[in-house]
Amino acid sequence: MDRNQATGLFLISALLLIYLFFFSPKAEPEKNKAQAPTTAATPASATAPTPALAPDVKLDSAAGPVRGIELKNPELTLLFSTQGGRVTAVRLNGYKTFFGKPLNLFDAQSARYNTTLTTTGGQKVDFAGLNFQADAPTTTPDGGQQLTFRAAVGGGTVTQTYTLPKTGFEVKYNLKLAGVPVQEPLKFSFVDHVRQTEQDLKQNRNHTTINHYQATGDHNALAEASEKPEEVTVAAPLLWAADKHDFFVAGFVADSQPFASGQFNATVNLADSTFIKTLSTTLALPAADVTSAAGGQYRFFYGPNQFSLLKSVAPGFDRNVYLGWGVFRWVNRFVIIPVFSFLQQYISNYGIIILLLVVLIKLVTWPLTYKTYESQARMKVLKPEIDAIKAKHPDDQVKNQQETMKLYNQFGVSPLSGCVPTLLTLPILFAMFQFFPNAIELRQEPFLWAKDLSTYDNPILLPFTLPYLGSHISLFTVLMTISTLFMTYQSNQMNASAMQGPMKFYSYLMPLIFFFVLNSFAAGLTWYYLVSNVVTLGQQALTRSFVNDTKIRAQLDANKIKNKDKKPGGFQARIAEAMRTAQERDAQAKKKG
């Protein structure tokens, strides 16, 4: 590993660490460890009995006793209450928590919908305080189910109609006020105390947030990893708002008219082992919409946070799946996800899918890999000349660099040619750090010793907790680290111009640092990089058979003859000029001294 390659490695590692620090979930402070359960331990909420799908019961009213009514299709089980005429519980039938319990997206103990309005006479009406009259559920022409609630308000009638399709995760909702003199606007609210459903409490919490999408096409979200109260007020029309629970979504979409405005809040109590985060949403419903002949048309979405499913729900609704920002999101959306989805059609084992994904990416990027290795071979061939320059100017670093740059120019070698191909692969590298922890396709998919590729594998449990490591050891991360260290050793042995001293130490230190960083990352990610390292080693062995040192030497000698009278240009010329200026400045300083 020469100086330029080491510099490139340092820059890549620095960029990766910066990305992980600013754009990945942060660890909880040590002072909170005693209060909050560790990720290796089973939290109290996971061992407690799963709450039944039962509504909260209030006193009887003129409409009769409060009743719970259930609607169900293959994907959803919904429980409604005549109190408020609202959804009180949602179960996703095809999913379970990491701990094997039925997955309730929310229930009467953890969440509450409510709508409030003020009549023109100043009367405040709270739907949660009304016991609605419920019609018997009916069957729709397409085989779905429809449920209607009615209540008398202000001399008129409030009608709420829910339609659950025969299949699917969406629920149509119609709110109509007939003869109700209402002031602008109505307030629709949803308070959601989120329970832990995944193994890693910290990731579960840090991936939980409220997303919202404006009619202008702007998407925003509350800070996911913040442990401080978060609040955002949007005084602009909104198309939808959604509570994202790591791998699942509870969303509310406006179909007829956008919501007039919205307010969103999130709070965290690290001492609470039952609820990992509390989300609160308040949306303003235009009065003209709900008082129209057709009523206000809305939709609830209760389902998995899956990109292929969400992109057809509403404009921008697929933004609930975090795929990174900028170019990294584009790489995930238009490269990784399509390839991953294609492989899913033919292979059911996701560990094998990840392996094939690595192979395909390595094949596509092989020209860049070949270019990097070829650059390393040129530097190796030039090692005698570089050593001669170092021996000639052992104490003059500036002169040493000048002569080295002149040598590069003579032989037509670019010091950056080995770094640029590696930098071009960075978008894929960073994209993977967001794809694997957010891919619900990997959730609860086992592979080898990993029970769930969407979270860390923990075959080794520690009787204590270590800073930055936790109380477990990920075997995939261990193997990935070993393979990275072997690659570093091989690279240092292969390159005759390998760095010595601190830079060589640094080349071995970085894999150890990443072991601590990645120990709690998704097993799918560390398996991906383990396979990537193994394939890279194979690529290097194969590439070496095509790169002949004798032919490279002949090519460099030919370049030297061709470039005999050529002056440095471009980047090399600027570096040479900068070095010359620095040398002159040092010479003048010595004269003055």
Image (cartoon, helix red, strand yellow):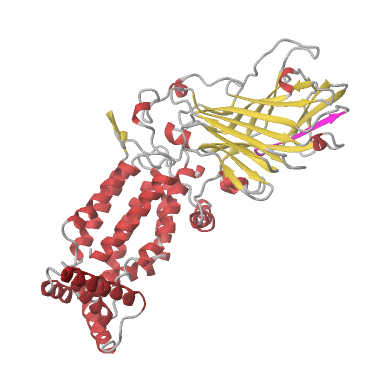
The C terminus - image quarter: bottom left
Work out whether 451 lies above or below 555.
above
Q: Position of residue 116 (x, y in %)?
A: 73, 26
Q: Position of residue 419 (x, y in %)?
A: 33, 65
Q: Position of residue 349 (x, y in %)?
A: 45, 47
Which residue does the image show at 32% across and 75% down from the upper left? 572
Q: Going by the image, does 196 lie left or right of 483?
A: right
Please say whether residue 128 is visible from this viewpoint.
yes
Q: Going by the image, does 108 lie left or right of 158?
A: left
Quick one: 92 or 14, which is closer to the camera?
A: 14
Q: Main secondary structure of the magenta part?
A: strand
Residue 75, located in which quarter of the rendered image? top right
Q: Is residue 75 magenta?
A: no
Range of residues picked out in magenta = 168-178
Work out whether 267 lies above or below 388.
above
Quick one: 525 or 77, which is closer to the camera?
A: 525
Which residue does the image show at 39% across and 25% down from the upper left? 37
